[in-house]
Amino acid sequence: MQLNEKIGAIEAILFSSGEPVEEFRLAESAEVNKTDLPALIKTLNQRYSDNDSGIEILKLGAKYQMCTRKKYAVYVRTAMESKKQTPLSQAAMEALTVVAYNQPVTKGFVENVRGIDSSSVINTLVDKGLLEEDSRLDVPGHPVAYRTTDTFLRSFGLSSLDELPPLEREDEDRQRSLLEDNNEE
Amino acid sequence: MQLNEKIGAIEAILFSSGEPVEEFRLAESAEVNKTDLPALIKTLNQRYSDNDSGIEILKLGAKYQMCTRKKYAVYVRTAMESKKQTPLSQAAMEALTVVAYNQPVTKGFVENVRGIDSSSVINTLVDKGLLEEDSRLDVPGHPVAYRTTDTFLRSFGLSSLDELPPLEREDEDRQRSLLEDNNEE
Amino acid sequence: METISFKLDVFEGPLDLLLHLISKHKLNINDIEISKLLEQYLLYIEQAKEQDLELAGEFLEMAARLIYIKTVSLLPKPQEAEDIKKELQGALIEYSLCKKAAEKLKGQFCGHDIFVREPLKIKLDSEYKLKHPPEKLVEAFFRMNVKKADLMKKADEQKINAVVQQKVVSVISKVVFVLKNLYRHGKSRIDSLFDGMTGRSERVATFLAILELTKSGRIMISDDNTEIFFKRVNKNAAE
């Protein structure tokens, strides 16, 4: 199989799947080596960006998904007649952040950190596809735990959870050092 | 707007729509002249065919649709089928076990044993051909009962239900015998 | 007194309000002056009450917590006071980290600008093709935490459960049941008719069926109320 055909197969699979496709499944179905996959995707993405194409391939965790390019959002929105969506509320952002940095976590955990009932806000995030239930939390009673989704990664321009911005502890450190200075005086 | 950007907008719109898009709506949303549209699509299709791309734009009456290229159909099918072949979830495996060891059984029975609604999980197992309906459960009211299939036997490397492994766990037996030893003392 | 113009609902919760107060009054989050914080906090709560704002329970709970911390700090148990204060400080620090991270993440949000498409709908063979060792089934069984004996018992009960769970048992069906029983055995012990019946509806229906049949004169009940038999069978026996 020619290089172009390998890429073509990958492209066709990602296009038709719509949803994110696991690396191994993509490699297997397109009949390419899993190790070659990143380079092939890179070539494809390069081609897209050279052409200012309307689409691109995003890496989301161990999956790939074909998406529209951000710069064309306005045209797509017009075509889909979708109204401007309301941004996430402060409460939703906080709950999402708690889950993102500590997943999998229960509603109780989120409530604990935020100091306020977070049940409805988590339900909203599940509805929006940013959070999903996770059955991995292996503690007695098996409470429902939540984790972020591929949609979450895509929505925040992340290709994996490792890319989450680090939690800022600077201020705290600075405060602490100020405190220590004071003590020394 | 650059030529490439016009094409990019068209591409993004056609990609995200999924369905065929009317010429006038496509032109309007991508902010191009309707008369220029055929040439722009032609350029895009030329680019696709030069690259042996996985996708192409088809004209269907007065509409355009982005589709996978026929030559890649086999990869697409493989990928979609492999997507369906996800390993059974824990819930599915449990429900399957309950049916396997007690067949024929009703959904109610499975629910009773698992302590959780098992309706959708049983439907999934029927879809996958691992369970089928069974009319042998001869009780008044003739509720729908389920039994395992030949596909089930094949999937678990059994040549008959008699070969189902006994529901015993070695370590448990050992514990039990230890316990009995203690009692004797 | 300083007038506070505010709306409590701009705060995401009591921790948010506390952080606001801490920064406003330049308190040290790592060593909070509890009395000052409490005073300011209560001011807000009072104000909210005056405005008839509906206060989330969490706000009142926090007030109680602050008062408690202050109280304990007045008692001659400095360690405990220090501990519960540290706990609150820890929660505040954690929450402030969360707020900052949320702010940062929010700036990255592009979810409304990226579009995806629905998967192509093609008809597929959905038959399961993966292979598993049969031991997977045993594993799944033990994960359910069901005792084998219970499972077998449930299996025995199934025939009844299947009926009971689906509908209320009709008296007519039990009239047929009782009659069939009598045709087969000539007479039946009443209690044996209830054997294996666990559902209340079924037991009630059976009992009513017996009463109904007696009333209509189809069957008779023995003098000691333990057996039923057909009227004609009784005649035959008497002859």
Image (tube, coloured by chain):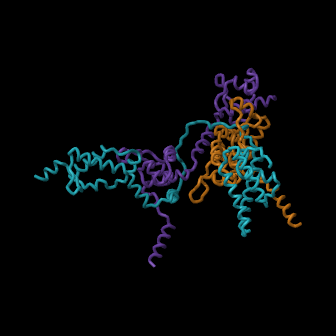
Chain colours: A orange, B purple, C cyan
| C134 and B147: which is toward the camera | B147
Residue C109 percent location from the top left of the image? 74, 42
Residue pictured at 26% horizontal, 45% vertical: C212
Residue that extends furthest to the left in the rendered view of this protein:
C239
Residue C115 percent location from the top left of the image? 70, 37
Residue pictured at 56% horizontal, 57% vertical: A141
Residue pictured at 70% horizontal, 22% vertical: B24
Q: Is residue B65 above or below residue A42?
A: above
Residue that extends furthest to the right in the rendered view of this protein:
A185
Tell me which corner region of the image, top left, top right, bottom left or bottom right, holds residue B164: bottom left
Observer able to see residue B110: yes
Residue that extends furthest to the front in the rendered view of this protein:
C1
Q: Is residue B34 above or below residue C73?
A: above
Observer able to see residue A33: no
Residue B135 percent location from the top left of the image? 38, 45
| C46 and B52: which is toward the camera | C46
Tell me which corner region of the image, top left, top right, bottom left or bottom right, holds residue B133: top left
| A173 and C32: which is toward the camera | C32
Residue pictured at 83% horizontal, 58% vertical: A175
- In the image: residue C153, left or right of residue B16: left
Residue that extends furthest to the bottom in the rendered view of this protein:
B185
Give the mark count.
0
Residue B81 percent location from the top left of the image? 58, 43
Q: Is residue B45 above or below residue C8?
A: above
| B66 and B94: which is toward the camera | B94
Q: Is residue A45 above or below residue C153?
A: above
Tell me which corner region of the image, top left, top right, bottom left or bottom right, holds residue C50: top right
